[in-house]
Image (spheres, grey):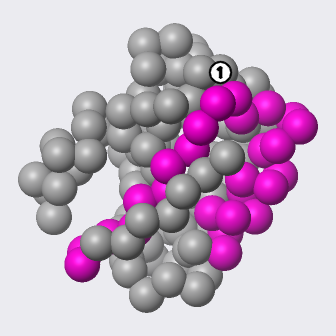
Amino acid sequence: MQTILESQKFTIVKLQNSITAANAYQIERKITTVLRENSHLNILVDLRQVEFMDSSGLMALMSSCKLAQSLQKRFSLCSVSNSLKIIIELTQLDNVFEIFESEAKYRETL
């Protein structure tokens, strides 16, 4: 479902498969745990292996992003597929999320 990796400057949450109503709550809880318990101020959610996301998945990411903001942490997405990018743009969440082409591009901003 997800993998948590830590580097010196940030934590990566790598999500897989689909993010739907069936698993969105679990994913949100995991990201919430990372945000609350991790000392890093930078959290990167890697969506490279996510094939599909429904509105519940978007809401899980939105809730996580809001929590990060309240904790004064940076919350970013990377490796968003074209199909997911379209969904994010149609819902105008591209104005909310900080989105990077890849993890390498994200690292350049640190």
Residue 11 image point, x, y percent? 40, 68
- Secondary structure category for the residue under label 1: strand
Q: How many marks?
A: 1
**Where 66 sits versus 16, above or below?**
below
Q: Is residue 22 left or right of residue 77?
A: right
Quadrant in which residue 105 is drawn: top left
* Residue for point 37% across, 72% down: 6
Frontmost residue, 89 versus 41: 41
Residue 14 colored magenta? yes
Figure quadrant of residue 20? top right
Image vertical order of residue 6 relative to residue 81, above or below: below
Image check: 5 left or right of 4? Answer: left
Of residues 5 and 45, the one nearer the viewer is: 5
Q: What type is the residue that disc 1 sits on?
A: Phe
Residue 29, percent from left and from top = 75, 64
Question: What residue do we see at 61% from left, 52% from top?
Answer: 2
Query: Magenta span covers which residues?
Result: 8-33
* Observer-nearest of 2 and 74: 2
Q: Residue furthest left?
A: 108
The residue at 57%/44% (across/down) is 15
Residue 35 visible in the current orientation: yes
Residue 26 vs residue 63, the one in the foreground: 26
Which residue, given by chain and number where applicable, does mark 1 sit on?
52
Is residue 87 found inside the magenta-colored segment of the image? no
Which residue, as the protein is rendered here, is positioned at the far right? 22
Instruction: Report the side of 89 relative to 17 (left or right).
Output: left
Residue 89 in view in this figure = no
